[in-house]
Image: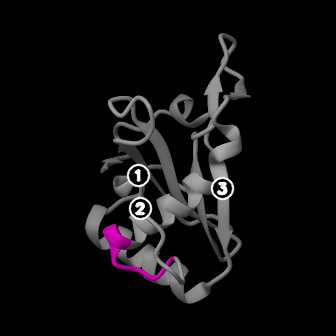
Amino acid sequence: MRLEFVPVEEFFFALTLSVRLLEELDNPELLEQMRSHLRAEYGQPSTIAAAQDNTFNYVFRLFGYGDTPETPLMISISDWNGKLRLSSDFGWTLSETRKPIRTEQFGQRSEFTDKLKVTLQDHFNLALVEHHPPSISEK
């Protein structure tokens, strides 16, 4: 499993049209730790926040998950109303008319979320989960 940061210079909104919320974590301390870590490691967020409720959004390509490990998934780590948000396009794709549609993997989003949280916990050295199920790279 490999995370690749998408800086603002490379960010295209069309890439994330199918990115949907996985989980929202209501933990202000964790939110501040993640915000500080992301800012220290990656600098400027991938997108510039448009509202006071959203102050950062870091986007990553996630390689090495699922049946097509060479095709990256999009992962977004952001804040909204004081909560940490994890989002991904896992289980979604864009139709020919660029509208998000569910894929056959949609029902596996909860399992994917659990593994993503462990992966992010290990990558950023932050407590995102209480127990330690397998990470994405251990799948």
Question: At 41% from the left edge and 72% from the top edge, which residue is drawn?
Answer: 121
User: Residue 66, position in %: x, y?
Assistant: 45, 38
**Residue 127 visible in rendering:** yes
Apparent side of residue 72 relative to residue 20 in the rendered image (left or right) = left
User: Quadrant of the rendered structure where residue 83 is?
Assistant: bottom right
Q: Amino acid at mark 2?
A: Ser
Which secondary structure, mark 1? loop
**Residue 52 visible in rendering:** no
Instruction: Determine whether label 2 and label 1 are within 8 Å by CB.
Output: yes
**Mark 2 = which residue?**
135
Which secondary structure, mark 3? helix
Up/down of 28 relative to 67, above or below: below
User: Residue 5, position in %: x, y?
Assistant: 33, 50
Q: 10 Å neighbourhood of mark 1: few (<14), some, or many (≥20)?
A: few
**Mark 3 = which residue?**
110
Calculate the distance from the C-alpha at mark 2 to the C-alpha at mark 1.
Answer: 7 Å
Q: Which sits earlier in the primary sequence, circle 1 or circle 3?
A: 3
Q: Which mark is residue 77?
A: none
Judge depth for marks 1 and 3 and give the one in front.
1
View extreme (top): residue: 96
Calculate the distance from the C-alpha at mark 3 to the C-alpha at mark 2.
Answer: 13 Å
Read off the magenta span.
122-128
Up/down of 82 relative to 96, above or below: below
**Mark 1 = which residue?**
139
Apparent side of residue 113 relative to residue 102 in the rendered image (left or right) = left
Q: Amino acid at mark 3?
A: Ser
Q: Amino acid at mark 1?
A: Lys
Q: 10 Å neighbourhood of mark 3: few (<14), some, or many (≥20)?
A: few
Question: At 51% from the left edge and 77% from the top edge, which residue is drawn?
Answer: 128
Up/down of 2 relative to 84, above or below: above
User: Residue 62, position in %: x, y?
Assistant: 39, 45
User: Residue 88, position in %: x, y?
Assistant: 56, 46
